[in-house]
Amino acid sequence: MSVYLHHVSLVTVDPERSASFYQSMFGLERLDRPPFKIEGIWLDCGPSLQLHLTKHLPGNFRTKGVDNNDVHFAFRTDDFEGVLARLVGAGFSEDAPEDSPMRLLLNRSGMAGFLQLYVMDPDRNIIEVNTAV
C-alpha cells in the first residue's frame, strides 16, 4: 500500500484574497472545483499536489507572528532567490516586528541542510519555502 499527500486545506476569511496571494507570490494556478456548499478555491501545486482554500469567517486561531515551530506547510523551489525577491518586493521583511504578518524568517544555514524561509499568508497561515531535494 502506498499513501501520498494529495492536498493541504487552509482556512481563509476571503478565498479570493488568499488565492491572489498564492498566485502572485508562488505562481500557483487555479483548478476546477466542484460546487461544494462551502466557498473555496483549489490551486495547483505541481505534480499531483493541490492547495485548497476554504472560507471560514472566524479564520484560524493564530495571533502571534510567524513561527517556524508552529503548524505550517512547505513549498520546495529551484529558485529560492527569486521567491525571496518576490516576497521582499511585496513588503515582507526580516526587520518587520515579531508580531507582524509581514515578517520574514530567513534561514540560510540551518540544521536541515537546505535554504529555508517562512512567511504568513493573509490569514496568518505559515508557509515555509525551501530548497530540499
Image (cartoon, rainbow, N blue to C red):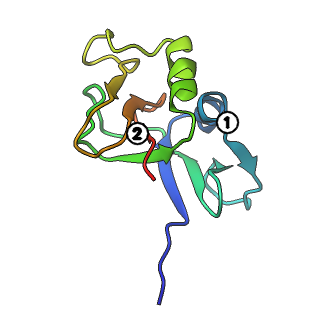
Camera-side residue of 117 and 15: 117
Which label sits on residue 124?
A: none
| Amino acid type shown at disc 2 | Glu
The mark nearer the N terminus, 1 or 2, is: 1
In the figure, 78 relative to 44: above or below?
Answer: above
Camera-side residue of 96 and 111: 111
| Residue occupying the point 28% across, 46% down | 112
**Is residue 38 visible in the rendered structure shown here?**
yes
Q: Position of residue 93 (x, y in %)?
A: 40, 13
Question: Which structural element holds mark 2?
Answer: strand
Q: Residues within 10 Å of mark 2 (few under 14, many from 20)?
A: some
Q: Position of residue 11 (x, y in %)?
A: 47, 45
Q: Are marks 1 and 2 in contact (CB under 8 Å)?
A: no
Q: How many marks?
A: 2
Q: Is residue 63 left or right of residue 122?
A: left
In the figure, 72 relative to 38: above or below?
Answer: above
| Residue occupying the point 32% across, 25% down | 105
What residue did someone put label 1 on? 27
Question: Which structural element holds mark 1?
Answer: loop
Residue at the extreme bottom of the image, as rendered: 1
Distance between the alpha carbons at the discs numbered 1 and 2: 15 Å
| Residue occupying the point 50% across, 54% down | 9
**Is residue 59 visible in the rendered structure shown here?**
no
| Amino acid type shown at disc 1 | Gly
Residue 67: image quadrant is: top left
In the figure, 91 relative to 43: above or below?
Answer: above
Which label sits on residue 128?
A: 2
Residue at the extreme right of the image, as rendered: 32
